[in-house]
Amino acid sequence: MQRFTKLAKAMPDKRDADDRRADFDEIYGGYSATEATAQASRCSQCGVPFCQVHCPLHNNIPDWLKLTAEGRLQEAYEISQATNSFPEVCGRICPQDRLCEGNCVIEKGFESVSIGAVEKYITDTAWEQGWVAAPVARVERSQSVGIIGGGPAGLAAAEALRRKGYQVHIYDRYDRMGGLLIYGIPGFKLEKDVVERRTKLLADGGIHMHSNFEVGRDAMLSELREKHDALLVATGVYKARELEAPGDGLPGIVPALSYLIASNRVGLGDPVPDFDSGVLNAKDKKVVVIGGGDTAMDCVRTAVRQGAASVKLLYRRNRANMPGSQREVQNAEEEGVDFVWLTAPESFHGAGHVRSVKAVEMHLGLPDASGRQVPTKLDGSEFILEADLVIKALGFDPEDVPTLFGAPELAVTRWGTLRVDHKTMMSNLDGVFAAGDIVRGASLVVWAIRDGRDAAESIHRYIQSKAGSLAAAAE
């Protein structure tokens, strides 16, 4: 270990930009055994591992780096999966530059350990070698848990509860499990077979998956409460934030998630009429994406692969203040995306279809209460950008869950997220828990996994406490 002074950081080979623009395959290759061993050996094994502290899952990163450096891959995998339900997913899509790698203590002057790439190598090797097993219950329990939402929070909770022996049922309104892992994240970051093999494994472990099931249509929340001993709401947040600028309703202006879902469905082989008609297809179009997060990065890079004539991203702050991953920004620039920093849209124009965006330059002023500099308009700096397709990637808000579920008594916060007791993760309804983005707002997949695992522990305590009370009353 501690070879960071002798070995430079080396990421896996990245495909040439010209090649990767032509398909939706992942852009990074994988380490060889020699490369993984060498890169893992750069870890300093520090006394206070800030990589672990700043990982939402508190993964035992130094331990599995040391085991990888020693060639003990199966043990490394066992430690990795002990705290992470989907290490193969996190190794691919986590913004490591903002989390574990960004807090690596050897970063100054030497560059951080390539933690995400090593994590991907460990888990991909585990799948190849057959070390990844379906969840096995040590004892079967009669109690059942219903989980509404088959995204990362719901799946993580389902796995943890199944290992404890509960009869777990997942209800999801889409035709595949995985949530945004399947429909929201493009294949060049996360190929869909990676998600599908994991959901198949969970089904093989005895988790019952009900797709195309919409709560409020196929069953009310009250009916599911009667059917199960506990419920977990893990629906995520899907409602697109609106821009509310003149001309915003013109055809050709679409929300980011609709655009990404259409693209991913095409990749999965599904029929998508709006893609075939060109409504959600960027081919030969001048595309303008508005936003600065990871979803905006997904949109611009998808548009490039669909054959857009040009792709521009408008963001009202500068590069240093962009919430999206800097690694993603670099990848997008390599692929030909034009970033128009310190710019915001003022209005949209066109006769029957959007044809241009009137934009204005911005200036970053003094920080607000959150510490971020406030963007203000520069008078007289307006200019016009041609656009045939405008994609709004402004973030997501929660849907009106109480109304959708036919449960107006379900309490929400002033932001529309579900109100829970953060110690127990239970809502104001007895036995109804919530986890993931529907509680914390739009966030990272790794946080959804953490929330799902925590919720599973709370549900276990709740059911066992209730069973104990009933047994005591019977005596």
Image (cartoon, helix red, strand yellow):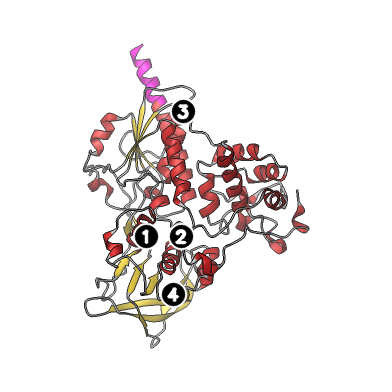
Query: Residue 91, relative to residue 24: is it above or below?
Result: above
> Which of the image's four quarters has the C terminus?
top left
- Out of 65 and 347, give the one closest to the viewer: 65
Q: Nearer the viewer, mark 4 or mark 2?
A: 2
In the visual, does 45 lie left or right of 380?
right
Q: Do the residues labelled 2 and 1 touch (CB within 8 Å)?
A: yes
For the residues labelled 4 and 2, the Cα–Cα distance comes to: 35 Å
Q: Considering the numbered disc 1 on the image, is that residue within a helix, a strand or a loop?
A: helix
- Out of 21 and 453, give the one closest to the viewer: 21
Q: Which of marks 4 and 1 is nearer the N terminus?
A: 1
Q: Which of marks 4 and 2 is nearer the N terminus?
A: 2
For the residues labelled 3 and 4, the Cα–Cα distance comes to: 50 Å
In the visual, does 81 lie left or right of 68?
left
Q: What residue appears at the point 61 percent right and 45 percent down from the top-left corner?
A: 122
Dot 3 amino acid type: Lys
Q: Nearer the viewer, mark 3 or mark 4?
A: 3
Query: Residue 284, relative to residue 369: is it above or below?
Result: below
Q: What residue appears at the point 44 percent right and 31 percent down from the top-left corner?
A: 205
Q: Name the residue under label 4.
A: 375
Q: Mark 3 points at which residue?
A: 164
Dot 4 amino acid type: Pro
Q: Mark 2 points at which residue?
A: 24
Dot 2 amino acid type: Phe
Q: Do the residues labelled 3 and 4 touch (CB within 8 Å)?
A: no
For the residues labelled 4 and 1, the Cα–Cα distance comes to: 32 Å
Q: Nearer the viewer, mark 2 or mark 3?
A: 2
Q: Considering the numbered disc 2 on the image, is that residue within a helix, a strand or a loop?
A: loop
Which residue sits furthest right? 6
Does the magenta portion include 472? yes
Q: What stretch is highlighted in magenta?
A: 464-475
Residue 455 visible at all: no
Q: Earlier in the sequence, mark 3 or mark 1?
A: 3
